[in-house]
Amino acid sequence: MFGVEKGTYALLLALEREVAIAVGKLGLCTFPSGYYIYVGSARGGLSQRVKRHLRGGKRLRWHIDYFVQCAEVVEVWYALGEEPLECLWCCAIGEMPQGRILVPGFGSSDCHCSSHLIYFLSPPSFELFQKGLGENGSQLKRATPSEFIG
């Protein structure tokens, strides 16, 4: 679908019930039920990175690998392009109503963001996120997980 194009992505995940997960060096983390957005960049190809997150039975390499074992990826928000926008996206998502950081340092060991995983009690709005990105929001698209696997 996307070939090897680079890009930035956000996984919208649903967690049905509270879980405690050992997340690499972060240790034991408790995640309440609700919705989460995880933001990342795919410098080696957007399609391959998202497919990896959706696949089971993989080597646990990144913080998100531990979390997706318990949560369901509901939707993928993405923008193609060379420039990694993940930190900008994290700021915009963090400013959305009800957005909260529950696990400082999650997914952000290579930048200065507080976290790349933001929690929401109810489903966050794609349109509100798009609006929060300003002119960068025009590049934003959404897809179902099956569109990446397809």
Image (tube, rainbow, N blue to C red):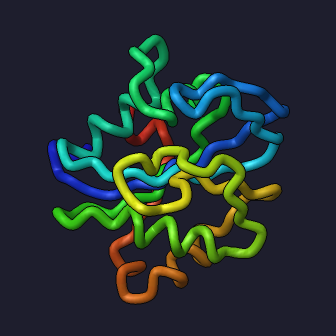
- Residue drawn where x is 66% and y is 74% of the image: 96
In-front residue for pair 86/142: 86
Q: Is residue 89 left or right of residue 48?
A: right
| Quarter of the image that includes the C terminus | top left
- Residue beneath the point at 17% across and 51% down: 5
Using residue 10 as the reference point, say whether residue 68 is left or right of it. Answer: right
Of the pair 51 and 24, the residue shown nearer to us: 24
Image location (x, y in percent) of residue 99: 71, 65
Residue at point 45% right, 50% down? 108
Residue 55, quarter of the rendered image: top left
Residue 124 is situated, as x and y percent measured from the top left of the image, at 69, 63
Q: Position of residue 32 (x, y in %)?
A: 82, 41
85 lies above or below 15: below
Q: Residue 106: which quarter of the image?
A: top right
> At 21% from the left edge and 44% from the top edge, which residue is drawn?
45
Above or below for 48 versus 92? above
Q: Is residue 114 left or right of residue 138?
A: right
